[in-house]
Amino acid sequence: MHNELRAKYDRLLERLRSLGSVVVAFSAGVDSTFLLYASRQALGDHVIAATGLSETYPEEEIAEARQLARELGVRHVMVRTEELTNPRYTMNSHQRCFFCKNELYGKLRELARAEGYAAIVDGTNADDLRDYRPGLRAAQQLGVLHPLAEVGLTKQEIRELSRIFGLRTWNKPAYACLSSRFPYGTQITVEKLRQVAAAERALRELGFRAFRVRHHEQIARLELQPEDLPRAIERRQEIVARLRALGYEFITLDLEGYRSGSFNRTLPKPLLVQTGERDRTL
């Protein structure tokens, strides 16, 4: 580990120790898993991993969160969130993530108060602060801290540290809640979320990684890694059969391949400029 990376990690441990006890918003992704590991190193048993439980996350990710918390020896709490009862969330505007995080962080604040824990922390990293993430506004309003970003750790540095410390999530593909699969303005329902979850499960079972199934009502638009496009063509009949069985009439391959935040290109540029953030997100 080079000196700069070591210094950042040392500052992270120091920052976490200064908090005394933390509830970690834990999604089982690369960032929150690394933060949970560091929190355990800094604070011992004064750490709770808290995962939001709703239809917006597939069963596989919930199971992964439970398993990782066990592996790291951290108490794990599932917190039921009710964002799908909020019409401001289900209408799926560009502020959807604000309402989601407002619901989650509000529940985590209740948990922290009930358990007598000093702070709520999440896995926001330094790169995220330059991204279009309405959820950061909810975090600010509810006092959620971003220790990784505070010490300047980038996504790549977090992956490198995770690899060094033996965390199996170091090369895990980026993941976002299932609601990010819908174009802005498309109503989000439990049935549609289940359909997308099943479609992505089918692609994982076929061996694909780091992809998205974007939902356009009867159309499933598959964003795959460019190197996976030939394999998708080879297995097109199987892919079509499995996704058509889930209710999609048309299954298309996006020739641009997988990229984070593909729906954000539909947002007005002034909106992104006003927020001071880049045109990239989920």
Image: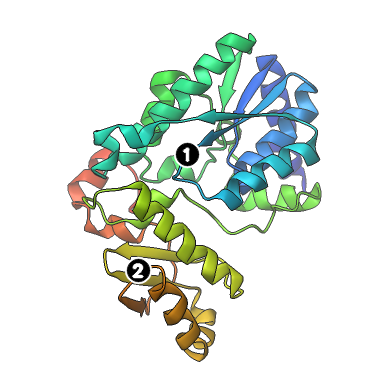
Using the image as rendered, state which of residue 98 and residue 64 is in the foreground.
Answer: 64
Answer with mark 2 or mark 1, whichever residue precedes in sequence.
1
Q: Secondary structure at mark 2?
A: loop
Percent position of residue 82, x then y: 40, 31
- Residue shown at the point (81%, 50%) measured from the top left: 166
Q: Secondary structure at mark 1?
A: loop
- Residue shown at the point (67%, 23%) measured from the top left: 15
Percent position of residue 98, x then y: 34, 34
Res. 41 image quadrant: top right
Using the image as rendered, state which of residue 215 and residue 16 is in the foreground.
Answer: 215
Is 105 situated left or right of 262 in this image?
right
Q: Disc 1 marks which residue?
A: 54
Q: Taking the image as drawn, is residue 280 in sight? A: no
Q: CA distance from mark 2 to mark 1?
A: 22 Å
- Residue shown at the point (36%, 39%) measured from the top left: 97
Q: Nearer the viewer, mark 2 or mark 1?
A: 2
Percent position of residue 39, x then y: 72, 29
Q: Disc 2 marks which residue?
A: 247
Packing grade of label 1 (10 A; few <14, some 14-19, many >=20) is some
Q: Kindly identify the amino acid type of the residue bearing the numbered disc 1.
A: Ser
Image height of 207 relative to 77, above or below: below
Is 128 situated left or right of 69 in this image?
left
Q: Kindly identify the amino acid type of the residue bearing the numbered disc 2.
A: Gly
Using the image as rendered, state which of residue 220 and residue 195 is in the foreground.
Answer: 195
Packing grade of label 2 (10 A; few <14, some 14-19, many >=20) is some
Is 167 situated left or right of 192 in this image?
right
Using the image as rendered, state which of residue 170 and residue 11 is in the foreground.
Answer: 170
Of all residues, the one furthest to the front in this rendering is 245
- Residue shown at the point (22%, 52%) measured from the top left: 267
Percent position of residue 182, x then y: 32, 56
